[in-house]
């Protein structure tokens, strides 16, 4: 994944690897122009309260429609963007676009935006966030930033300093993919996160694995003790949702509640504050 590995791959004798390296380089070049060409878009996925079924917010998820290759998933192009530095411009575009679109919504839902460790390393993020909030007029409390543990591990002192300044603006911060990193508990001790997003791998296994269920239960207990709400990622079935209700999970996100959708497909009537309030969470799942 590091730059060095890619260039070294060219020296191997397998012709396939040579091709893969060239392919990656071509993708990196295309990516630099993706913003200007208008090939990037944000999709939005709903985040729902488990006990009430109310919509709490939407997570912005980046999509790249490549002119020849079609839709390329973020897992494929974000590592490339992080390597060649284009993640800085892309990340800024994501933040600005998400805040602008959310500010135009006729509701008070949160908008969650993912951040890359590279952004923390190279940009004064607190300042950028502050600028974007002023520019778009979005209320700070409606913005939630999501970061993974790898971000904190990369440069702990610098990241924590930036996060404190970001929180001082009134913006909230969530730890993403919780449970898959190396130092989950230390991460929680280091910084007052506003939300724990439990990685979807636990949800995927919960119906057949007592271990996964025990871990979910433990994280929910931890969240309650630390007074940090827990959101379960990757909720795909009614059974998973019922387990979360019984175990007292705060929020859920997943295909059952809604797939990531382009802005114009988000039903703003559905998303309106009082429209969703009375909606029972099971009906929310079936409405899909
Ligand atoms: P993430 O932040 O953990 O986002 C959740 C991912 O899980 C999304 O994948 C979403 O489409 C997928 N997902 C949601 N519900 C379900 C479900 O019920 N089942 C399954 N199997 N998957 C579900 P996506 O959109 O492909 O994004 C993948 C990752 O790419 C994100 O993981 C995030 O780490 C990164 N990413 C996406 N957008 C951005 C961005 O704007 N900036 C940065 N730095 N990273 C981003
Ligand atoms: Mg996320
Ligand atoms: Mg996640
Ligand atoms: Mg993820």
Image: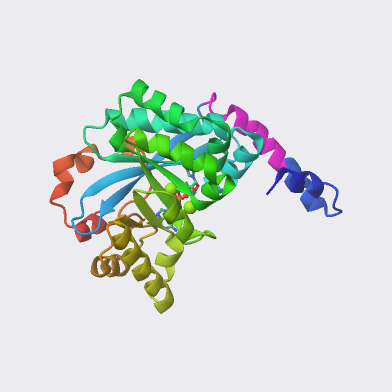
Residue at 24%, 70% (x, y): give it.
246
| Quarter of the image where one finds residue 107 | top left
Indicate whether residue 260 is drawn in magenta: no
| Quarter of the image where one finds residue 185 | bottom left
Does residue 72 appear anywhere in the picture? no
Image height of 121 relative to 243, above or below: above
Image height of 171 relative to 253, above or below: above
Does residue 4 appear anywhere in the picture? yes
Residue nearest the viewer, comparing 145 with 69 = 145
Image height of 85 relative to 237, above or below: above
Residue at 39%, 55% (x, y): give it.
197
Q: In this view, which residue lies farthest toward the top?
A: 135
Main SS type for the magenta part? helix
Q: Which residues are magenta?
A: 23-37
Residue 39 location (% of width, % of height): 52, 31
Q: Is residue 145 left or right of residue 269?
A: right
Residue 22 location (% of width, % of height): 75, 41
Q: How is the image coloured?
A: rainbow
Residue nearest the viewer, comparing 204 with 265 = 204
Residue nearest the viewer, comparing 15 with 108 = 108
């Amino acid at each position: 994944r590091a730059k060095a590995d890619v260039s070294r791959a060219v020296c191997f004798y397998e012709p396939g690897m040579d091709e893969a390296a060239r392919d990656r380089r071509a993708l990196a070049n295309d990516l630099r122009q993706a913003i200007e060409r208008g090939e990037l878009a944000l999709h939005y996925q709903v985040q729902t309260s488990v006990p009430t079924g109310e919509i709490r917010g939407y997570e912005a998820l980046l999509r790249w429609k490549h002119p020849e290759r079609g839709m390329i998933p973020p897992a494929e192009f974000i590592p490339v963007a992080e390597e060649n530095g284009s993640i800085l411009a892309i990340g800024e575009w994501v933040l600005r676009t998400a805040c602008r679109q959310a500010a135009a919504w006729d509701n008070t839902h949160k908008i969650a935006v993912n951040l890359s460790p590279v952004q923390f390393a190279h940009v004064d993020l607190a300042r950028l966030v502050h600028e974007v909030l002023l520019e778009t007029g979005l209320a700070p409390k409606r913005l939630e930033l999501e970061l993974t543990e790898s971000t904190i591990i990369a440069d702990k002192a610098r990241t924590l300093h930036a996060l404190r300044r970001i929180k001082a603006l009134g913006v909230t911060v969530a730890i993403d993919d919780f449970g898959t990193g190396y130092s989950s508990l230390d991460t929680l001790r280091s910084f007052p996160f506003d939300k724990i997003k439990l990685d979807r791998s636990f949800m995927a296994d919960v119906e057949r694995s007592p271990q996964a269920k025990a871990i979910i239960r433990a994280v929910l207990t931890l969240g309650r003790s630390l007074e940090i709400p827990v959101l379960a990622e990757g909720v795909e079935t009614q059974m998973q949702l019922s387990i979360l209700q019984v175990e007292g999970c705060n929020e859920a996100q997943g295909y059952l509640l809604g797939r990531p959708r382009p802005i114009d497909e988000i039903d703003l009537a559905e998303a309106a504050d009082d429209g969703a309030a009375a909606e029972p969470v099971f009906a929310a799942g079936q409405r899909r």
